[in-house]
Image (spheres, rainbow, N blue to C red):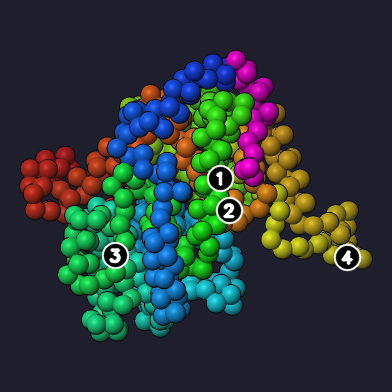
Amino acid sequence: MIQLKFSYKNALNFVGKQDIFKYQEAIDSHFLAIRERTGRGNDFLGWTDLPSAIDEALIGKIEAAAIRFREKSEVSVVVGIGGSYLGARAVIEALSPHFNLLKKKAGNPVMLFAGNNISEDYLAELLQVLDEKEYTLTVISKSGTTTEPALAFRLLRDHMEKKYGKAATKQRIIAITDKEKGALKQLADEEGYETFVVPDDVGGRYSVLTPVGLLPIAIAGFDIRKLLKGAQNMAAFSATSSKIDVNPVATYAAVRNALYTKGKTTEIMVNYEPRLFYFTEWWKQLYGESEGKENKGIFPAGVSNTTDLHSMGQYIQEGMRNLFETVLSVEQSQHELRIPDDEANLDKLNYIAGKRINEVNHMAELGTTLAHVDGGVPNLKVNIPEISENTLGEAIYFYEMACAVSGYLLGINPFDQPGVEAYKRNMFALLGKPGFEKETEAIRRKL
Ligand code: PA5
């Protein structure tokens, strides 16, 4: 059985059941197309089998590499961007203590991320930190040629070779890339770095259950077998039925498309746990890059509450009515903390003295949901009992599968990303990259 539950009762003021269930036939055929790999983008459906297809030898190799790195690391740096970054970060941040001092206490390396921006200050300050820490580095790039991680890796490799020498550097770098092609693969082979493979048939944003996500998650000290088990459970459950009233994957895909056709063109993923900030970022990439094409697609946004109720809450309550929300709701917290009684009661909080903070958070969640629904914002809810490897594994597979089905309902290919090349061409032209001479001339005329 799965632990994740999905509810759309707070959307029913905005869409009728007939608007949702009209997708049943299409959903049945999309489930079949995914299983039989006959739909658009079917070369990139390797992720559907990942949770159970990953073999014991690979899991063992990942765990062994993680142990080796953990022994050498106060800090472990993960270099990558987009799909080669967000899955690992989402899971690591969701499972880690909030504060670095507590991470250290638990005996885990502090995980730092690079290659996901081109900020000179970010990289310079990272090098300052690494001057003083024992560190290891995982570089992840499927193509092996993406500018942001390539740049960061060049700087970090240089730093590492100066700090540890060339021979020791070899033991401190792992590359995750294509099995045979690309600059990173060539470099890793020449330098003798340990490597892991990004499977050909898995796109970046669906790759968290490959070494791309699993190795950094294991280095950070988390149980990748439990993560895979959670995803396996969701995959097995999802394979039993494509019925909208049985399978939450089908329900979510149908409801969000029904809302979209009613003009709800922005979906806000809402969390009430700061640990889930990067999970929302992962979800934004998954849905944005999968669905935003051919001038279509729901725009995926995110808020972290209650923090953002004091910044974005006004807009959500009373701004443009093209929004719906999907709350990733967590029942249990990891710690128990009760509100102390205070005789003076100047802050007037004694009426909740003795209550758990988590209960207050849940009342904030419920109150917000009801207010937003009253304000014209439909509300969907994905519920998990706690944040753990197991529930995150379930949630990852749930969102991936729903994204594929939802993308097919929208009539687009959910597995390509042709639009991400445009900025790269301009940037290469502006930087004068060899091979881009014509573009350089054309762009200079525009400026
Ligand atoms: O999902 C995707 O395909 C992208 O986000 C890529 O993962 C991202 O651009 C990084 O690409 P690469 O792994 O080739 O460096």
The relative height of residue 105 versus residue 253 in the rendered view (above or below) is below
Instruction: Tell me whether circle 2 and circle 1 mark residues in contact (CB < 8 Å).
Output: yes
Q: Which amino acid is tagged 3?
A: Thr
Label 4: which residue? 342
Distance of label 1 from label 4 (alpha carbons): 47 Å
Label 2: which residue? 390
Task: Tell me the quarter of the image containing the C terminus.
Answer: top left
Q: Which mark is residue 91?
A: none
Q: Nearer the viewer, mark 1 or mark 4?
A: 1
Mark 2 or mark 4: name the one nearer the start of the chain.
4
Which of the pair 139/240 is nearer the observer? Answer: 240
Q: Which amino acid is tagged 1?
A: Asn
Instruction: Tell me whether circle 2 and circle 4 mark residues in contact (CB < 8 Å).
Output: no
Q: Which amino acid is tagged 4?
A: Asp
41 relative to 376 in the view: left or right: left
Residue drawn at (32%, 34%) of the image: 42
Percent of width and height locating residue 21: 57, 19
Which span of residues is magenta-colored?
1-18
Task: Tell me the quarter of the image containing the N terminus.
Answer: top right
Percent of width and height locating residue 102: 60, 73
Mark 2 or mark 1: name the one nearer the start of the chain.
1
Q: How many marks?
A: 4
Distance of label 3 from label 2 (alpha carbons): 27 Å
Distance of label 1 from label 3 (alpha carbons): 29 Å
Residue drawn at (24%, 82%) of the image: 167
Label 1: which residue? 233
Hey, which residue is sitting farthest front in the picture? Answer: 56
Label 3: which residue? 195
